[in-house]
């Protein structure tokens, strides 16, 4: 076989495997997503049918969610607001605590900084759900059940360690000479923090703010345990309640789930480069 | 869940001029700056850990647990979930990360679609998988009927199939995340290494074994440990795909702990359930912390 022919053949094989893998991947990825959209476009009677494609696609489920005209959805927009409020608060607190701590470890370099790093590392490696039972009891003692503060506290606790790692890593690329120059000009640590450190950390702040917001938006277990009802419930908790009943309005559930999934989807794809930017910063060290 | 990053080793900095001479006032500032995190760590990590261990320290809870017929099945489920969920997922992610290093707009576009399960919150996806696998009205069995005119299996009504479905849901949701991590790892390998291997006439398989694998081994190990820990604590997949059913046969430790504590109203037994994961969790955490410090890789 001539060299050119071997090359053409191997390119052909590459294209063929590429096409096969692509088709398998697309089916694998899109099947559950298609199912969400399919069910959300079915009328109530059609949910319990054997159709693969909606027979009479309708937006009535979305309309019901929008108008909150079903008893499980009667405060849907309020719940979206709660999710948003808790998410933004978690993001702001995570940024505040994370930057302060990373400033102490990385820039002020106190001797006991390694203890802070280890504390963060330990928190990062504990499965969040394992502390749910004691956390629930403790919040009950403080009288914070059914209070968003309890959920905010636990989400900040579990978002901060990752924030500290990333800030330290990012901060290492900012030359120490800047801090030293500011010191010679008579700047105090808070002035260095606000005028030198924070402005230079802006890209990392955006990435971590997004991360904390999404962690909170997606969190179910603690919100479910700590927010039992009334006006403080978040969307995931409300979606979970659909499963409890005998009646299964799956079309409404899926329509509500789509509306709930849209903000994080937009954020993921808009900040994709920022979020995978961290991926390419370091590399593999074997 | 976290976005990913590989942590850069901190370059050795020249000894700072004020290293020894931290002013007294600076010390106060450092203490003030560190206080919020120390407070959070003490109140929301240390205190709950101690309280949890105390809650789970009653021997009667463990006796009740051992008498519970669901418990042995739960242990087996947890191990199967970790073994298959984590390893299948990471092996697939490793293979796919190689696929996505191919150049061209087509593969970039495919990667964007492939990322979707990671970007969609877990709950809608797991709920969709639950309904998709419904034996009577689910999409999968509807498709099976249309194609073959036979009834598909009752995915969520048989213990083994239901556990398999939970593992499928877990892999579906988290495969893109780990693929992106490995993709970043592969892209960070200097091209010259592959070019040198090409010059020596290495085949694709040889390049994978002698260049990619040695350089990715550390990252792969860290990912396995971390993914195992996260899967051990995962509550949502079981809760929303199988609900622990049929007949409580697909519970894992994380969901059984919550059930015992809140549905049965016995926090001591719930905590005991969770604490029986410690013989697995503690070695994993120690190994992981050592690896993270040595490799400076954070995910």
Image (cartoon, helix red, strand yellow):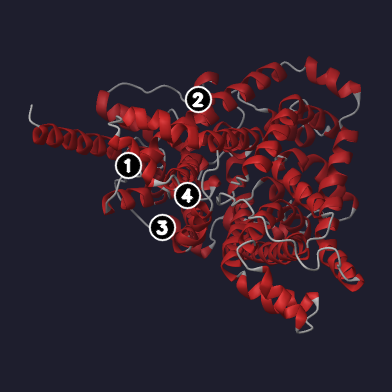
- Judging by the rendered image, the residue that carries numbered circle 3 is A60
Near-viewer residue (B47 or A6): A6
The x and y percentages for residue A101 are 76, 61
Q: Secondary structure at mark 1?
A: helix
Residue appearing at x 62%, y 41% in the figure: B295
- Looking at the rendered image, the disc whose residue lies closer to the viewer, 1 or 4, is 1
In this rendering, would B282 be left or right of A134? left
Q: Are marks 3 and 4 in contact (CB under 8 Å)?
A: no
The x and y percentages for residue A238 are 62, 52
- Looking at the rendered image, the disc whose residue lies closer to the viewer, 3 or 2, is 2
- Judging by the rendered image, the residue that carries numbered circle 4 is A254
- Judging by the rendered image, the residue that carries numbered circle 2 is B164
Q: Whole-Å distance between the Cαs marked 2 and 4?
A: 23 Å
Q: Are marks 2 and 1 in contact (CB under 8 Å)?
A: no
Task: Choose top left, top right, bottom left or bottom right for residue B74.
Answer: top right
Quadrant in the picture for the C terminus of chain A:
top right
- Judging by the rendered image, the residue that carries numbered circle 1 is B195
Q: Is residue A5 above or below residue B11?
A: above
Q: Earlier in the sequence, mark 2 or mark 1?
A: 2
Q: Residues within 10 Å of mark 3 (few under 14, many from 20)?
A: some
Name the chain under label 3.
A
Residue appearing at x 64%, y 68% in the figure: A175
Task: Choose top left, top right, bottom left or bottom right for residue B256.
Answer: top right
The x and y percentages for residue B122 are 54, 46
């Amino acid at each position: 076989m001539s060299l050119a022919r071997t090359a053409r053949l191997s390119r052909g094989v590459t294209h063929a495997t590429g096409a096969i893998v692509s088709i398998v991947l697309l089916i694998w990825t899109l099947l559950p997503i298609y199912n969400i959209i399919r069910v959300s476009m079915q009328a109530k009677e059609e949910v319990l049918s054997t159709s693969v494609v909606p027979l009479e696609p309708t937006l009535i489920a979305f309309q019901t969610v929008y108008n909150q005209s079903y008893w499980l959805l009667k405060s849907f927009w309020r719940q979206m607001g709660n999710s948003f409020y808790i998410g933004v608060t978690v993001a702001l607190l995570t940024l505040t605590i994370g930057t302060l701590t990373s400033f102490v470890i990385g820039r002020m370099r106190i001797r006991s900084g390694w203890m802070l790093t280890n504390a963060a590392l330990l928190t990062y490696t504990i499965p969040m759900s394992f502390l749910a039972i004691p956390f629930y009891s403790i919040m009950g003692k403080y009288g914070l059940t059914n209070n968003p503060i309890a959920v905010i506290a636990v989400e900040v606790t579990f978002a901060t360690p990752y924030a500290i790692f990333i800030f330290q890593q990012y901060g290492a690329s900012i030359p120490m000479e800047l801090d030293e120059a500011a010191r010679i000009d008579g700047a105090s640590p808070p002035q260095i923090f606000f005028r030198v450190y924070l402005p230079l950390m802006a890209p990392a702040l955006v990435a971590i703010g997004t991360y904390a917001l999404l962690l909170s938006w997606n969190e179910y277990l603690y919100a479910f345990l700590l927010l039992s009802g009334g006006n403080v419930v978040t969307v995931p908790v409300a979606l979970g309640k659909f499963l409890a009943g005998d009646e299964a309005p799956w079309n409404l559930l899926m329509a509500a789930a789509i509306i709930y999934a849209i903000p994080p989807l937009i954020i993921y794809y808009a900040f994709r480069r920022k979020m995978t930017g961290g991926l390419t910063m370091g590399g593999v060290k074997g | 869940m976290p976005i990913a990053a590989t942590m850069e080793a901190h370059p050795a900095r020249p000894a700072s001029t004020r290293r020894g001479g931290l002013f007294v006032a600076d010390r106060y500032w450092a203490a003030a700056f560190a206080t919020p995190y120390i407070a959070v760590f003490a109140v929301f990590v240390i205190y709950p850990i101690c309280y949890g261990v105390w809650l789970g320290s009653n021997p009667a809870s463990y006796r009740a647990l051992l008498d519970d017929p669901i418990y042995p099945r739960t242990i087996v489920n947890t191990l199967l979930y970790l073994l298959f969920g984590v390893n299948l997922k990471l092996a697939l992610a490793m293979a796919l990360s190689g696929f996505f290093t191919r150049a061209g707009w087509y593969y970039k576009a495919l990667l964007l679609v492939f990322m979707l399960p990671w970007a969609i919150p877990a709950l809608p996806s797991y709920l969709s998988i639950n309904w998709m696998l419904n034996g009577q009205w689910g999409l999968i069995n509807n498709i099976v009927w249309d194609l073959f005119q036979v009834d598909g299996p009752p995915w969520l009504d048989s213990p083994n199939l239901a556990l398999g479905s939970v593992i499928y849901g877990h892999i579906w949701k988290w495969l893109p995340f780990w693929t992106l991590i490995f993709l970043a790892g592969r892209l960070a390998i200097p091209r010259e290494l592959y070019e040198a291997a090409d010059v020596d006439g290495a085949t694709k398989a040889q390049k994978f074994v002698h260049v990619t694998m040695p350089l990715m081994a550390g990252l792969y190990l860290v990912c396995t440990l971390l993914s195992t820990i996260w899967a051990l604590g995962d509550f949502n997949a079981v809760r929303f795909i199988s609900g622990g059913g049929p007949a409580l046969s697909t519970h894992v430790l994380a969901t059984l702990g919550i059930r015992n504590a809140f549905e049965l109203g016995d926090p001591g037994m719930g905590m005991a359930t969770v604490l029986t994961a410690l013989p697995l969790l503690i070695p994993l955490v120690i190994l992981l912390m050592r690896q993270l410090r040595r490799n400076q890789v954070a995910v």
